[in-house]
């Protein structure tokens, strides 16, 4: 089934999220001391290296360059959402009040250090009165391995703070290196687990495969802790939305740490029933002193706002 009342394929926006519950010590991501910045030939210099060495940019070979159009790679199927341009815009309501928007755009394929990657551009911004009280207008560019959808590189742009960072993922070791984009200096390093995802990349993974396969979780680093996520299908529902009626698959995220369930409250996501598996609605109900609700709703293309 396809989305109704929508003539164009829509791109997916990433919802930012991070698990806050505590984790056993051996499951927490660990920060490690920052080594000296690498030189252009891949070696490192001691701490007393010259200023020019410390002001190097991130490894040039990891910079994205255009790649060929999507095609089958080593027997790996192309995700439905990557077969044509896609843009998704979500309205985010907190306790019934619109707090902001999130836009997810698929930009095509690029090469990162010789690897083919899918390029996603995600932007989040607050709106209304909240934009004055708590202004957010951030963009993250994601580069996901075309074979696994695990992140290779992330580029952060925080317009309000004027700070740009780059995160480089070593998927063999699980080490994530954060660098200042302009100088290339290492800001911090975090030790996680091999084949690690983040909340956005794991959402795109489940749009591609293993939706409803509860015994195939992905390791996810949300910024503080490492946890495991899989999904459980509740059934098929037809939703009435601003886009018209949509046939969906209702899914519950299953979150665990060290094999034990980690209750994050009442979470539910509705994916479209077609091959794109577009997230149509997200609902979260949780308790922090009192009960709160958060709803992310997919907006029609003609009314989606671009943000300030």
Image: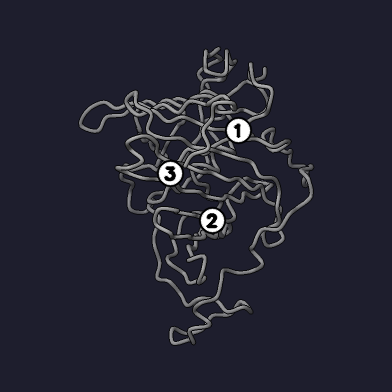
Residue 275 position within the rendered picture, expressed as x and y whole percent measured from the top left: 68, 26
Residue that mark 3 sits on: 227
For disc 2, the neighbor class at 10 Å (few under 14, some 14 to 19, many from 20) is some
Q: Residue placed at 54% from the left, 56% from the top?
A: 155
Residue at mark 3 to residue at mark 1: CA–CA distance:
19 Å
Q: CA distance from mark 2 to mark 1?
A: 22 Å
Which quadrant is the N terminus positioned in? top right
Q: Earlier in the sequence, mark 3 or mark 1?
A: 1
Mark 2 or mark 1, whichever is nearer to me: 2
Q: Which residue is mark 1?
A: 207
Tell me whether circle 3 and circle 1 mark residues in contact (CB < 8 Å).
no
The tag on residue 155 is: 2
Residue 58 horizontal/vertical position (percent): 57, 68
Image point 69% across, 22% down: which residue?
A: 7
Up/down of 185 relative to 255, above or below: below
Q: Secondary structure at mark 2?
A: strand
Which one is nearer the viewer's eye here, 176 or 62? 62
Local SS, label 1: helix
Q: Report whether residue 30 is seen.
A: yes
Query: What residue do we see at 20% from left, 31% from top?
Result: 289
């Amino acid at each position: 089934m396809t989305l109704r009342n929508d003539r164009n394929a829509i791109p997916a926006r990433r919802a930012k999220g991070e698990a806050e519950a505590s984790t056993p010590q051996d499951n927490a991501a660990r920060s490690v001391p920052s080594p000296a910045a690498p030189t252009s030939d891949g070696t490192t210099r001691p701490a007393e290296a010259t200023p020019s060495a410390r002001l190097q940019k991130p490894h040039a070979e990891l910079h994205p360059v255009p790649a060929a159009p999507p095609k089958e790679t080593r027997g790996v199927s192309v995700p439905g959402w990557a077969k044509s341009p896609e843009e998704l815009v979500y309205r985010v309501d907190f306790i019934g009040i619109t707090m902001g928007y999130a836009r997810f755009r698929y930009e095509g394929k690029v090469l990162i250090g010789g690897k083919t990657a899918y390029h996603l551009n995600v932007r989040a911004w607050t709106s209304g009165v909240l934009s004055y009280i708590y202004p957010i207008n951030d963009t993250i560019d994601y580069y996901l391995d075309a074979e696994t959808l695990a992140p290779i590189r992330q580029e952060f742009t925080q317009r309000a703070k004027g700070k740009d960072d780059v995160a480089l993922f070593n998927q063999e070791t699980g080490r994530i290196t954060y660098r200042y984009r302009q100088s290339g200096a290492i800001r911090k390093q975090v030790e996680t687990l091999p084949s690690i995802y983040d909340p956005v990349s794991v959402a795109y993974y489940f749009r591609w495969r293993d939706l409803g396969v509860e015994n195939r979780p992905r390791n996810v680093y949300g910024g503080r802790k490492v946890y495991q996520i899989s999904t459980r299908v509740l059934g098929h529902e037809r939703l009435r939305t601003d886009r018209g009626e949509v046939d969906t698959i209702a899914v519950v995220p299953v979150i665990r740490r060290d094999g034990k369930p980690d209750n994050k409250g009442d979470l539910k996501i509705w994916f479209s029933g077609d091959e794109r598996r577009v997230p149509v609605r997200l609902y979260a109900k949780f308790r922090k002193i009192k009960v709160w609700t958060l709803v992310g709703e997919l907006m029609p293309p003609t009314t989606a706002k671009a943000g300030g």
